[in-house]
Each structure stands twice: as C-alpha cells, then as structure tokens.
Amino acid sequence: MPYLSLWWVWMVGALLLAILEVLAPAQIFLGFAVGAAGVGVALLLGVPGLATSLPMMLLVFALVSLVAWLLLRPMLGIREGQVKHFEHDINED
C-alpha cells in the first residue's frame, strides 16, 4: 500500500483549503476541504481499497467534496433577502 502513508498530505491540503475559504469566502473551498479531510481520515484509518491507487483516492475526494458542498450550500449560501437592490440613484434629485 504505497499511498497509506500520505494521509498527512491530504490533511495539510484540507487545512490549506480551509484557510483559503476564510481568506476568499466563496463557499466552494470548504467543500473541497471536507473532501480532502475525508480522504485523509480514511487513509489514516486504513479503509480497504482506498490506498491502492491514486485514481480511487481522487474519486473518493471528488464524491465527498460534492456531497459536502451540496449539504453546506443551503446553510452557507446566499439566502433570499440578502441581495440589496437600489431603486434610484443617489445623484438624482
């Protein structure tokens, strides 16, 4: 299992993506951070079949990131009433 010892790389990637989410809040980097942390934890726990190939890890990363984004988007996304609309210009009389 050559990829089993790379769990810490995925966790560092998750941390960097979480920091990027704080610096540039777009509600997408958080989903990727959750996906990377999920793969890191799975590798640390030794989930069978995951540490055998890089494509399998990338597939799990993509699926966990997508599910995390779909679950977090309603909670963190733009809600109704948050967008401000201006009816007239302040330069008009």
Image (tube, rainbow, N blue to C red):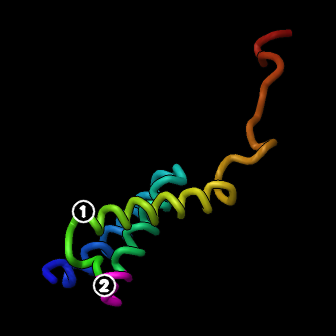
Question: Whole-percent x and y of residue 11?
Answer: 33, 76
Q: Please identify the residue farthest to the right as the structure is shown.
A: 93
Say whether disc 1 or disc 2 marks the residue closer to the N-terminus.
2
Image vertical order of residue 30 relative to residue 5, above or below: above
Question: Whole-percent x and y of residue 45?
Answer: 35, 90
The dominant secondary structure in magenta is helix
Q: Residue at x 21, y 83 (%)?
A: 4
Nearer to us in this view, 80 or 24: 80
The answer to whether residue 92 of the structure is visible from this angle is yes
Among the 4 quarters of the image, the one containing residue 55: bottom left
Image vertical order of residue 19 relative to residue 4, above or below: above
Badge 2: how crowded within 10 Å, few (<14), some, or many (20+)? Answer: few
66 with respect to 6 (left or right): right
Which residue is denoted by mark 2 in the rendering? 48
Image vertical order of residue 39 relative to residue 88, above or below: below
Amino acid type for the residue under numbered disc 1? Pro
Q: Please identify the residue farthest to the bottom as the structure is shown.
A: 45
**Which corner quadrant holds the C terminus?**
top right
What SS does tag 2 mark?
A: loop
The answer to whether residue 22 of the structure is visible from this angle is no
In the rendering, which numbered label is found on residue 55? Answer: 1
Badge 1: how crowded within 10 Å, few (<14), some, or many (20+)? Answer: few
Among the 4 quarters of the image, the one containing residue 87: top right
Magenta part of the chain: 41-48
**Which corner quadrant holds the N terminus?**
bottom left
85 with respect to 43 (left or right): right
Nearer to us in this view, 17 or 2: 2
